[in-house]
Image (cartoon, rainbow, N blue to C red):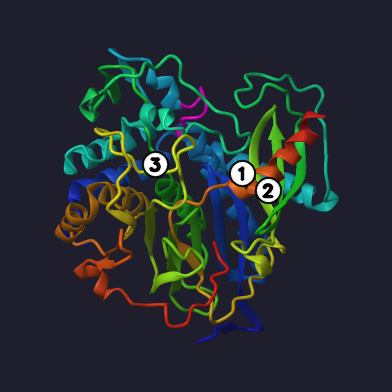
Amino acid sequence: MMKWLGQQKLITFQKSMLAMGTVINIQVVAYEEDRRAVLEDINRAFSIFYDIEHRFSRFRSDSEVMKLANRSKQEVLVSEMLFDLTAYALELAELTNGKYDPTIGKIMEQKGFDRLYTTGQTFSSHDVPHAAVHYRDVQLNEKNRTIHLNKPLILDFGSIAKGFACDLAAKELEAWEGFMINAGGDVLVSGFNEQQEEWTIGIRHPIHKQTNISVIQTTNCAICTSGNYERISRYDPHTHHLIHPQTKQSEQSLLSCTVIAPLGMLADSLSTAAFLLGREEGYSFLAEHEIPAVMVDQTADMIVTPEMKEVHSWNHNQHLSQTKHF
Amino acid sequence: MAKINKKMISLCTAAISSLYITGYATTHHAQAVQTAQSNTQTDASNNTSLTSDTTATQTEDTTSETELTDGTFSGTGSNEIGSISVSVTIKQGNITSVEITSDNTRYGQSSISSLPNEVVIRQSADVDTVSGATLSTQDFETAVAQALEQAKA
């Protein structure tokens, strides 16, 4: 399977950075002679993550999201990107009857998800009151590309932005034989790895975290997981970051939900939405939309959608090799 | 996949192409090239404080009460799972990037990240990567804090 071109062998270039509150790893498969150009593209890809973070962070008062937060009862002209992401998030909120709700920002802050990963400083939006808000409090004006908030509220793109940044970063890397972007567990793969094979992606076991519940081999798609086992509230060890907007409690019927989709933002947001819908409703939602997905429930049982059975995968439990990768 | 709501797909596509609508891409690329160049300089001189831009006016510093000096600073942290090194870049008083320069934790890619930008040695038993719940940056906090201490000095 090894491909030789002249005397050259494909190699993998990689770099890891902290951005968007997590660890981002990018690998690019290319030839040694292209090293310089590859590294420049990798740097461009990373600067996209920082740019998206800057625009959508809840932890900095100068992000577009935070600047919008208290400008209620008026038409606010926003960037194309904020408008489009909001339009997508509202559509997903409709589809899930509000189980997924992008106006959850203030609740997230209250629950202790309010800390900037670089300096550890907490951020509090004093100018946004604690009040019941709903995704229907956000209105879009397609014609003027404006957003109207009925009340001050904080939009939270925590379950879209990483996948979205992967989609944008992918555009910077598309010139190369193959690449893989892993944004803290949200994965986007393209082309082939250096063995000229489709990428192998482990799905982390939500309890035995050094092992995988399953390994899939695929390419040109995104694989994203929402799980209860990494982000825990600073105030309550029983509260994780996947919170119901209505009850303000975290969902308990699942340990993790992994979704495969053609785009990072789809996989990222659908895994969150399905997690919040819970074991039964989430499964129906994914199955109805014919989305390949793997859920792990409270009792650590695996539930897979019919479409997942068509994805090349195998259970990894027989040979529990330690996974050394992010 | 066929039945993913068409509207959802087109909303995604619109969002992804929005990056290229407003002429953002051109300026963004220029910045990225600069980043790449400054990274090369960083590699050359390796450790701690590279430059200190004393003339830079410090504006809106939302992340820290103490002013940060521009430059690239490295820090190392270790805990029960291993050790980690980072390189933090500060421009105009703000943290602009945090690179992981080595990661010898058992969660990290020990054979890989200790050699940034170098060839990945992939063992057949391993997978290429792992999808999981969003990793926390907790393990990196000490290393980042150490780098920032230098930037405050």
Q: Which residue is mark 3?
A: A239
Q: Is residue A259 left or right of residue B90?
A: left
Q: CA distance from mark 3 to mark 2?
A: 40 Å
Q: Which residues are magenta?
A: A56-63
Q: CA distance from mark 1 to mark 2?
A: 6 Å
Q: Position of residue B94 (x, y in %)?
A: 66, 30
Q: Which residue is mark 1?
A: B32
Q: Is residue B105 left or right of residue B68?
A: left
Q: Which residue is mark 2?
A: B36
Q: Position of residue A217 (x, y in %)?
A: 40, 74
- Residue type at numbered disc 1: Ala
Please say if the residues under marks 3 and 2 sit with CB atoms less than 8 Å apart. Answer: no
Disc 3 chain ID: A
Q: Secondary structure at mark 2?
A: helix
Please say if the residues under marks 1 and 2 sit with CB atoms less than 8 Å apart. Answer: yes
Residue at the far bottom: name it: A1
Label 1 crowd (10 A; few <14 / some 14-19 / many >=20): many
